[in-house]
Image (cartoon, rainbow, N blue to C red):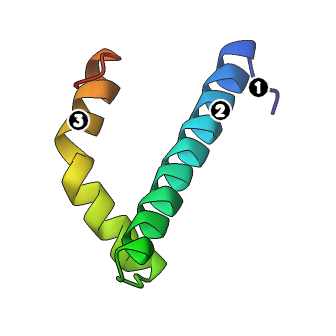
Amino acid sequence: MLLSPFDTLAQRITEEFREAIKHEIRRYKWIEKERGRDLSWEEAWNEWTLAHRENLGQFLMTGDEII
């Protein structure tokens, strides 16, 4: 099955977005470690997701950042 150029672009954007989120969670994990909290990946992911759920949803829906 051949992918259309749109599918290829969408797939690349999805992969880049996923990597950007992973980077932010690693960054959050590092900041928390500096504060004395040694979080597991799952704990960091859960906390980051809860903290940023509204902004992430808004960004996905409109492409606009909320500051």
For badge 3, the amino acid type reads Asn
**Above or below 34: residue 1:** above
Q: Badge 1: how crowded within 10 Å, few (<14), some, or many (20+)?
A: few
28 sits left or right of 9 in the view: left
The x, y position of residue 35, in whole percent, is 34, 74
The mark that comes first in sequence, 2 or 1, is 1
**Extreme residue in the right direction:** 2
For badge 2, the amino acid type reads Gln
Residue position for label 2: 11
Q: Quadrant of residue 54?
A: top left
Q: Quadrant of residue 47?
A: bottom left
Of the two numbered discs 3 and 1 in the rendering, the one whose residue sits closer to the viewer: 3
| Residue drawn at x 82%, y 27% as measured from the top left | 2
Of the two numbered discs 2 and 1 in the rendering, the one whose residue sits closer to the viewer: 2
The mark that comes first in sequence, 2 or 3, is 2
For badge 1, the amino acid type reads Leu
**Residue 1 or residue 62, whichever sits in front:** 62
**Real-space Cα separation, disc 2 to disc 3, in angstroms:** 22 Å
Residue 3, labelled with which disc?
1
Q: Badge 3: how crowded within 10 Å, few (<14), some, or many (20+)?
A: some
The mark that comes first in sequence, 3 or 1, is 1
Q: Badge 2: how crowded within 10 Å, few (<14), some, or many (20+)?
A: few
9 sits left or right of 26 in the view: right
Residue position for label 3: 55
